[in-house]
Image (spheres, helix red, strand yellow):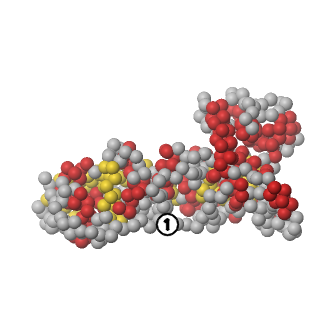
Amino acid sequence: MAVARTRSIALLGLAGSVVEVEADLSAQLPAFVIIGLPDTALGEARDRVRSAATNAGCPLPQRRLTVNLSPAALPKHGSGFDLAIAVACLAASQLVSADSVARVVHLGELGLDGRLRPIDGILPSVVAAARAGCDTVMVPTGNAEEARLVPEVTVVPVASLRDAALWHGGEFEPREVEPVRATARTEPSIAADGDLADIVGNESAVAGLLVAAAGDHHLLLLGPPGAGKTMLASRLPGLLPDLDTEAALEVASIRSLAGREVGAALTRRPPFEAPHHTATAAAMVGGGSRLIRPGAVARASHGVLFLDEAPEFPMTVLDVLRQPLESGAIAIHRANAVASFPARFLLVLAANPCPCGAAGSMSDPCRCTSLVKRRYLGRLSGPLLDRIDLQMWVPRVTVANMRLAGQQNGMSSATARVKVAAARAVARDRLRNTRWRTNAQMTGAWLRGEGKLHPGARATKSLDRALELGNITMRGYDRVLKVAWTVADLDNATAPTADHVGQALYLRKGITR
Ligand SMILES: [Zn+2]
């Protein structure tokens, strides 16, 4: 038999498709032709596969080899097809079992020395293989841990092309090689593993965090430098419920594609992403010329995206947030394809009240004019702030506050998480016949109309008054109502009372009405 077949996976965003890899050996003059790959990758794969086969001690015959990757129209990026191409060629040359090769999905890049190199995006690739009904996947040793996170798939780790050939019944002497290890990209980041109990003397901010976590409300923290805004934001993931298996796999898959370490067990805790204000729009969205990598908004999916000093971010970067905030996904457009990543996150913006940061603090005087202040926070206004339900003023913690709070023990993250989970369950039950799952997702018109969730004029007296006086807009009114429901859910009440509405109004004392 001169034709052999196997399979590999092409990724576009998180979605993987099965690629058929066919190799044909004919008696013509020696040549190595690959069709169905984009031009640059094609030449590279050809050179790598031939050298790797020679150096692994299982050289391809000096005849004409034609490899076809189909479907041709499917965009194929990266170097993960090397192993599939190589084993298909070995099978066509009758050096290994064609039946064995046909049953297995192959993923991995070849080094010129014949060793297999780990690739990014192994997890989503193996998930795609499993969904397509494939039960055995061969991967580089360095990717084995990650591949094994997918249940019900047999993972065959191999260190070299020679090991792969041996596994497929090739008659070669085993040759021990040092496997190539994965090198994860580590980027400096703010740790999100501290406890809520660490926050002392800032009770109202802690209450606001609980409301944000329970209702899925986006949050703006306004306050002078040193008020602990970063510390507050980094505690928020700790208040969110554990991820279910599907969400955890999605989060790990995004990390895998981003070239971050995934580990041997699925992480159930929600991610925390805090890009610096020098981050570019591309760093937020994602991109890359070969494999399309997810940016910060996708990496924050199912968790928290924190923008410290939000007004310092370029407008182009802040604009990028609009699409994910609306649709829960981010699309990356390429000449021949669109990659889409999930991007549903809880957004936390932090801002100083003015460029010098001193406004509102008692010690240093602020010299910013009111025009400068307005312009500074004005950079955040409009469509972005329209989606932020909570706006909290975070004062600098004074020594007196600390002493007062020091006597009582603050709430731990574990306790808060139980409260948040209970409140979320109540909201989910109330919204069970709608397309929403959390209070933040409701629309104001539905809430006041069809949903019949207006708590009545007695409860909203203060809010109605604020609307009459023009202290709050109709949009702001609706947002306070939504937050009031979350406050009520946390309080185990059947509907918001005047007190709950009052607390919700307090959690909106920011820069917009
Ligand atoms: Zn100032």
Q: Residue at x 68, y 42 (%)?
A: 419
State the image quarter where residue 34 is shown: bottom left
Q: Residue at x 47, y 65 (%)?
A: 184
Name the amino acid, label 1.
Arg
Front position in the image: 407 or 176: 407
Q: Residue at x 26, y 60 (%)?
A: 164
Residue topped by disc 1: 185
State the image quarter where residue 235 is shown: bottom right
Tell whether 21 sits left or right of 346.
left
Q: Does the rendering let one see residue 511? A: no
Front position in the image: 385 or 238: 238
Tell whether 102 sits left or right of 190.
left
Q: Does the rendering let one see residue 181? A: yes
Tell whether 403 sits left or right of 119.
right
Tell whether 100 sits left or right of 44.
left
Q: Residue at x 84, y 59 (%)?
A: 403
Q: Secondary structure at mark 1?
A: loop
Counting the numbered discs, the total is: 1
Question: Residue 15 placed where, x, y %?
Answer: 43, 49
Question: Residue 470 placed where, x, y %?
Answer: 85, 42
CA neighbours of label 1 inside 10 A, class few (<14), some (14 to 19), many (20+) = few
Front position in the image: 35 or 250: 250
Q: Is mark 1 within 8 Å of ligand 1?
A: no
* Depicted 415 relative to depicted 312: above or below: above
Question: Residue 16 placed where, x, y %?
Answer: 40, 50
Question: Residue 273 placed where, x, y %?
Answer: 60, 58
